[in-house]
Image (tube, rainbow, N blue to C red):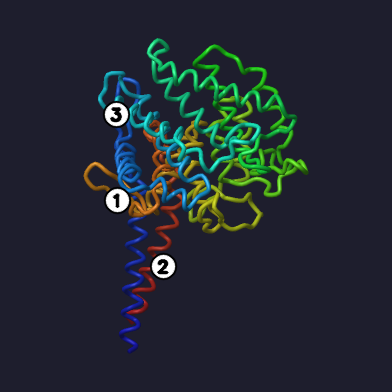
Amino acid sequence: MRHFIMGLIRASLALFALLVLYFNIKLYDAPGCDATPTGYVNTDVVRQLHFLRRALYQENADEAMQNLYPEGYAFIYSLNGLAWCAVAETLDPEAPLRQEALVEAARSLRALDSPSGKNVFDVRLPLEYGAFYRGWTAYLRGRLLRLSRPAMRDARQVAQFQEDCAAIARAVTQTKQPYLESYGGAAWPADNIVCLAALSLHDKIMEPQFQSVKKEWLSRIQHTMVPAYELIPHDYDLVNGRSPAGVRGSSQSLMLVFFPEIDSAFAVGQYRNFRKHFLAYRMGLPGIREYPGGVPGSGDIDSGPVVLGIGGAATIVGIKAAQQYQDWDLSVALRNSVETLLFPQQSGTEKTYLFGKLPILDAFLAWSNAGICVACRQQTGAWRWAFQLFSVLLLVLCAFLIRKSTK
């Protein structure tokens, strides 16, 4: 029996050593990056989007995600459409993949415009259907319009985009509150930041109309920042004028993606504070905390799983947030750490994570990774050394224990 137990221990230690080696190899994983006249196309992301196309249109993943998350249907189509837009942006206008990307992004927008896209949101709110729905839908519509020459834009989509943005601006000017509701009585700052980004995008691709509204609204929002962190809160109680939850990594990562579109100077300050309070390292690898340092908390519907304080959603969206601030090493380190842990699988023209069982995860990763090729070419690569040093120590310990167990 003793020999059997010792053999089992040695086998477990050997397996653990192989796992450590696997992690070190995966940290050098590089996405497929095809050069184009204006940048790079991440072919890994295109494979993910091909999987999502099948999942959405053949396997009803949109309905399945809605059953899991309050905005699952709208969120997965928003992210899918924006990821396709990111693919199209780096391609020549006549490239077949660009045409495919535009078709798929427009398809996502139609899903958002459909009754199924709207039916979980309240049309009776001051901003009809609320800040989440109007913000993400308007922003995706604007991104699609930006990909077309002004003379070639669909007049109906232009009119709808202008109405979306005008409706957001009207709702803002008709209240003194810092945030618009996403649901009756519930306001989420991140949804409002997406609305603000839609107004900014409008004024960049069309005749500017919302500069004063945007400036005044951002000023209101800045007055709600949590003093201890100088960051925008995760939620906001409109009745009592405070944030019950304080600051959270999942919403910080998301808002940071859109801040540069709104106010670049403010964005830089927010990113600096974000790094200070939410960037953490575990065994030498970076992750984004769901709660700021020293604040305990568990996972929920917004954060996804929280392991050793590191938030799943915060870290995945942090990949894209870091790109927005040219924090290349952090973006690649987060991407490769996630790539190591989520068991990517590639088959034919498709790529999935966690065996394709949670398509909204694939949508977040496709959106976050769409621009990673630039980061990969700018990184120094020095971020791996701490984990590698830790790995050497673990391997030495494993070797020592295996040798000791044979005596």
Left or right of residue 74, residue 170 in this image: right
Label 3: which secondary element: helix
The answer to whether one can see residue 330 in this image is no
**Badge 1: how crowded within 10 Å, few (<14), some, or many (20+)?**
few
Q: For mark 1, what is the residue? A: 345
* Sequence-first tag of 3 and 1: 3
Residue situated furthest bottom in the rendering: 1
Label 2: which secondary element: helix
What residue sits 32% from the left and 68% below the top? 14
Amino acid of disc 3: Glu
Nearer the observer, 397 or 327: 327
Q: For mark 3, what is the residue? A: 100
Q: Nearer the viewer, mark 2 or mark 1?
A: 1
**Badge 2: how crowded within 10 Å, few (<14), some, or many (20+)?**
some
Q: Nearer the viewer, mark 2 or mark 3?
A: 3
Q: Is residue 53 above or below residue 163?
A: below
* Sequence-first tag of 2 and 1: 1
Residue 1: image location, x then y, percent? 32, 89
Residue situated furthest right in the rendering: 240
**Badge 3: how crowded within 10 Å, few (<14), some, or many (20+)?**
some
Q: Is residue 328 above or below residue 160?
A: below
Left or right of residue 101, residue 195 in this image: right
Q: For mark 2, what is the residue? A: 397
